Amino acid sequence: MFADDARPAPYQRFERPLPTWFAEAKLGIFIHWGAYSVPAWAEPIGELGTFEPEYWFAHNPYAEWYFNTIRIEGSSAAEHHRSTYGGAPYDDFLDVWKAEEFDADGWAALFARAGARYVVPTTKHHDGICLWDAPGTEGRNTVARGPQRDLVGEIAAATRRAGMRFGTYYSGGLDWHAADFGPLERSDFEPQRPKDEAYTAYANAHVRDLVDRYTPDVLWGDIEWPDAGKPEGPLSFAHVLDAFYRAAPDGVVNDRFGATHWDFRTSEYQQGRDLESGAWENCRGIGYSFGYNQVEGPEHHLDGPGAVRHLLDVVSRGGNLLLDVGPTAAGTIPELQRRCLEQLGDWMSVHGAAVHATTVLDAAVARPGDPAEGAEGAGWVRWTRAGGTAHAVFEGGDRVRLDADADRLDPASARLLDGTPVAAHAAGGALEVEVPLRAYAHGPAVVALDLRG
């Protein structure tokens, strides 16, 4: 998954209003689960967008790219695969992947508790293994092999029972089994991306089958689309999109299908930040990998307050966050990831009004802050707006100075989201608020203030 790869110009947003549910959701859960969850191994070097591409591919921290990285000669993954598995074929992992502890309703309950409004599992990642009995896969799927279950269907049903929307991720631009061009070692995907009619028909049939079976609310594509599906004609992906919008009139499509239209842009960790305008979504793992990586420790993971800070940074700038979990091969959510989501849920249960259905607050009213800026008394601060209410979300002590226009906000209205009044007053062109330390019980504090005028 790489946000900037192979996006041909011109790209245009669909001429349709962004569905209200998606604009107001703010938080979704991504799921990367596959045969790669068996080895569950990658080098935890850091976040995408902070390394040169050639170094990135050879030391890829994405465990879901294991099939690619083990084929890069001299890579640590290749050595790990030789020493641990004797260089066994990748598909051996499919057969030993059993998902024996998978509880879709348990997952959905955790995601809903965290405050998520939609869930998007990978239905086929770049290794080409489908998590449902997709047409044309000749048994290379989780119904015929491995778990011997329709994992997509189970996640879809549980997600909807829990009151959330359901989406599907599908890798159309890369398939290392159906269209193998060898390992990727650099950021130029064009020579190693399938473009022919046969693969196009294969991929089109998969997405159409996902639409027909599961009626997803989100179509989330990755790494382009084969070129034979771009022009007008019987293989045009536009026909698949037409079927999707007929089945889900308020559905949304991301910008990675290689078509010329999309509903929302996507960034990934630190890559693609220039795309974060209009309707957009940032995706990232709780750790440095999307798929489960057994090598990662606490130092590589967001904790609950860290997830809150990232969520509020995204939401305060007008985006959604698609926060990923990478389950184990058995089907459990790893403890560090579970703990993060539970802590996020504890915070959201009190402060969700500062996230869901909010909009960007005008910078003329108030501005964000970061400790690195060094302003006395200032700490990490983000703002959101809900109707006539501004939400200050911040970290600090019992007295915090906010970079805000006290003439545009009513200090007398300052309150915690449980209704507890707090002291606030204008101070030297800013706003000072005093909060009880219990306001930081689960992470950043939130103070609501009425907007004047």
Image: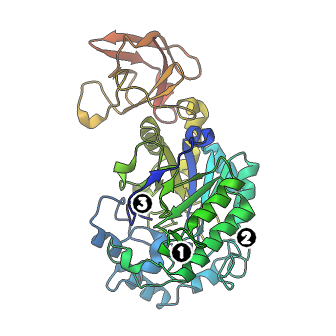
x and y percent of residue 165 in the render? Answer: 67, 49
Name the colouring of the figure. rainbow
Instruction: Identify which residue is drawn at 34% across, 10% down.
Output: 426
The answer to whether one can see residue 101 in this image is no
Q: Which residue is mark 2?
A: 150
The quadrant where residue 169 appears: bottom right
Q: Is residue 416 left or right of residue 97?
A: left
Q: Mark 1 is on which residue type?
A: Tyr
- Check residue 395 in the rendering and tell me which mark sits there, or answer none: none
Give the secondary structure at mark 2.
loop
Query: Is 193 placed above or below 354 here?
Result: below
x and y percent of residue 140 in the render? Answer: 65, 83
- Going from N to C along the chain, the mark reached first, 2 or 1, is 1
Instruction: Identify which residue is drawn at 42% across, 82% down.
Output: 70
x and y percent of residue 171 in the render? Answer: 53, 69
x and y percent of residue 65 in the render? Answer: 46, 73
Q: Mark 3 is on which residue type?
A: Tyr
- Check residue 288 in the rendering and tell me which mark sits there, or answer none: 3
